[in-house]
Image (tube, rainbow, N blue to C red):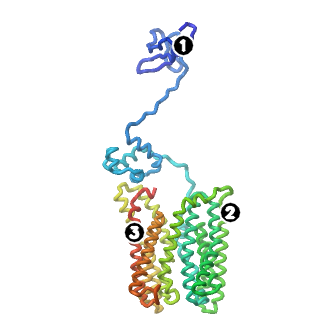
């Protein structure tokens, strides 16, 4: 290299030595070997690096740190699972995620050297490091005393129209009314339950406008569906146009109540139907002379509730919002399951009550305590998930976690039974005071008290979307009641109700079996922490 050439120098610090490298060499010339700088006076570079006299400092360089590749399979597992475990709060949730990923005790022993999945999960959790904080979430809606009262009021709100049933029954006075009420009640339960499920799925996907349109459309379609049910009854069992209007109004109220409960406007539903309740009470006290007034006010209240529900769906969401059809298609199996569950639930209640609606008031009224406390059952089911999430933060071992969840289910079941028993005992006491108390009425009332506890487990299963098990259990209970009753010759569905006490005892046994089936369906679910993340 001539003296006029400018030499580029790359300086590397290797231990205590400074090595100068020549990045390239002309063809045919050997590459420069690393050598020590010659002795002599040195001068300091402003950055602190030393160079021999006469040398020019190289341009400043930036160190590049190469990533270290871990050969520890446990580190690889932690890195792979980290995106899914960024919100894990304990080793139990890590164990649930590992099991869901296919990790077994054998894999934990053979590949990672731990005794089981839970020991492996504890080590993975310790290596995850601190949690990655989420973006600040908007403040949650205040769930204070009013929120609890709101949920507890759902049962009485749905039961409000029953206050005018005596006046309506007096107007019709025909046995086809029993079939009309049973058919419309079952159809309304199925119709409104499916609409509510679809609406909640759309709301969870952020489709506010699609949610409002769905609820508005199903509300408008409810009277038509009810009228079709009334036509079926009129054709098969007789009746007239008034019966068709009755079934149309029944579905209209059920769907209006669903919409107002969905938008948390229960007070408006109560305000629209309160005059009808007062009119129904006045009819019971004043007699037949007040019947036209009671029926007219009831019809006005129903129309008011229907209009208020439609108004509640207006102005929701923004223009340009994506369609909700893809969301509903993704949940079509759940929609089918909810529809079937609603139908089976209605069949369970109505098959036992319908034969006695016009002949045995004590048996027909036994369902009232259950309806009154359904809000309480719903509230206990709502808070269950929140309480179990709290358990995952305190309990590490799976056996202790399962035991704690079962204790929670037992406590809530006992609470639902006790709360349902309060109005049931009041009803029995009233029947005793009025001379209407019978063994059949007491047994049927006891069956509905048991259903208060069974429906808690049913709500929990519905939360896990185990609709197939729910429907199969409900149909099994109905088949047991009807089948054994037919064998004994006491089923009112195959003849006149001649042995009401025996039939009510069979129904009580069938709902006890239903409770056991629901708990059996919960058994493989409640102890797995991954369902509560």
Residue 447, horizontal then vertical, whole percent: 43, 80
Check disc 3 and report its element: helix, strand or loop.
helix
Q: Nearer the viewer, mark 2 or mark 3?
A: 3
Tell me whether circle 2 and circle 3 mark residues in contact (CB < 8 Å). no
Q: Is residue 405 visible?
A: yes
- Label 2 and label 3: CA atoms lie apart by 43 Å
In three-dimensional space, the C-alpha distance between marks 2 and 1, rounded to whole angstroms, equals 75 Å
Decide if residue 518 is on the left or right side of residue 194. left
Q: Secondary structure at mark 2?
A: loop
Q: Position of residue 408 (x, y in %)?
A: 40, 65
**In this figure, which residue is indicated by the disc labeled 3?**
519
CB-based contact (under 8 Å), mark 3 and mark 1: no
Q: Residue at x 65, y 74 (%)?
A: 306
For image coordinates 50% across by 88% down, the residue present is 361
Determine which of the numbered discs, if any, sits on residue 303 in the image: none
Q: Which residue is mark 1?
A: 7
Neighbours of disc 3 within 10 Å: few (<14), some (14-19), many (20+):
many
How far apart are labels 3 and 1 at the CA level? 84 Å
Label 1 residue SS: loop
User: Which residue position is annotated with label 2?
Assistant: 315
Labels 2 and 1: the sequence-earlier one: 1
- Number of marks drawn: 3
Q: Between disc 3 and disc 1, whose residue precedes?
A: 1
From this viewpoint, which residue is outermost toward the left? 115
């Amino acid at each position: 290299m001539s003296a006029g050439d400018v030499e580029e120098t790359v300086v590397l610090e290797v231990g205590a030595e400074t090595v100068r490298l020549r990045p390239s060499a002309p063809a045919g010339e050997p590459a420069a070997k690393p050598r020590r700088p010659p002795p002599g006076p040195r001068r300091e570079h402003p950055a602190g690096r030393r160079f021999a006299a006469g040398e020019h400092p190289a341009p400043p360089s930036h160190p590049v740190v190469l990533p270290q590749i871990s050969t520890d399979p446990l580190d690889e597992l932690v890195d792979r699972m980290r995106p899914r475990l960024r919100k894990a709060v304990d080793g139990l949730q890590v164990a649930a995620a590992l099991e869901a990923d296919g990790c077994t005790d054998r894999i934990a022993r053979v590949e990672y050297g731990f005794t089981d999945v839970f020991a492996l999960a504890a080590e993975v959790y310790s290596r995850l490091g601190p949690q990655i904080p989420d973006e600040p979430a908007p403040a949650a809606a205040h769930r204070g005393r009013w929120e609890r009262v709101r949920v507890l009021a759902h049962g009485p709100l749905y039961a409000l129209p029953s206050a005018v049933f005596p006046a309506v029954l007096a107007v019709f006075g025909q046995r086809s009314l029993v079939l009309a009420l049973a058919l419309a009640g079952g159809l309304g339960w199925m119709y409104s339950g499916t609409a509510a499920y679809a609406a909640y799925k759309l709301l969870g996907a952020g489709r506010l406008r699609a949610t409002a349109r769905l609820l508005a459309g199903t509300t408008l379609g409810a009277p038509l569906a009810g009228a079709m049910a009334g036509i079926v009854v009129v054709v098969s069992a007789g009746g007239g146009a008034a019966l068709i209007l009755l079934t149309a109004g029944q579905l209209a109220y059920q769907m209006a109540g669903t919409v107002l409960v969905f938008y948390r406007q229960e007070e408006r539903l109560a305000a629209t139907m309160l005059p009808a309740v007062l009119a129904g009470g006045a009819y019971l006290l004043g007699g037949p002379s007040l019947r036209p007034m009671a029926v007219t006010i009831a019809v006005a209240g129903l129309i008011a509730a229907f209009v208020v529900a439609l108004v509640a769906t207006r102005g929701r969401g923004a223009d340009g919002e994506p369609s909700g059809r893809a969301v509903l298609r993704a949940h079509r199996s759940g929609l089918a399951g909810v529809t079937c569950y609603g139908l089976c639930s209605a069949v369970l209640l109505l098959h036992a009550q319908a034969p006695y609606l016009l002949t045995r008031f004590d048996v027909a009224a036994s369902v009232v305590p259950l309806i009154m406390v359904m809000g309480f059952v719903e509230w206990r089911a709502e808070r269950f998930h929140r309480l179990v999430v709290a358990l995952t933060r305190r309990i590490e071992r799976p056996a202790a976690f399962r035991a704690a969840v079962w204790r929670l289910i037992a406590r809530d079941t006992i609470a639902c039974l006790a709360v349902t028993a309060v109005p049931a005992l009041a009803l029995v006491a009233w029947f005793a005071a009025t001379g209407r108390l019978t063994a059949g009425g007491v047994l049927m009332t006891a069956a509905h008290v048991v259903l208060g506890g069974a429906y808690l487990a049913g709500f929990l299963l519905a939360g896990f979307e185990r609709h197939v098990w729910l429907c199969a259990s409900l149909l099994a209970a109905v088949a047991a009641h009807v089948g054994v009753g037919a064998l004994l010759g006491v089923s009112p569905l195959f003849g006149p109700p001649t042995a009401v006490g025996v039939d009510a005892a069979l129904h009580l046994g069938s709902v006890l079996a239903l409770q056991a089936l629901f708990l059996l369906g919960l058994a493989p679910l409640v102890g797995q922490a991954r369902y509560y993340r």
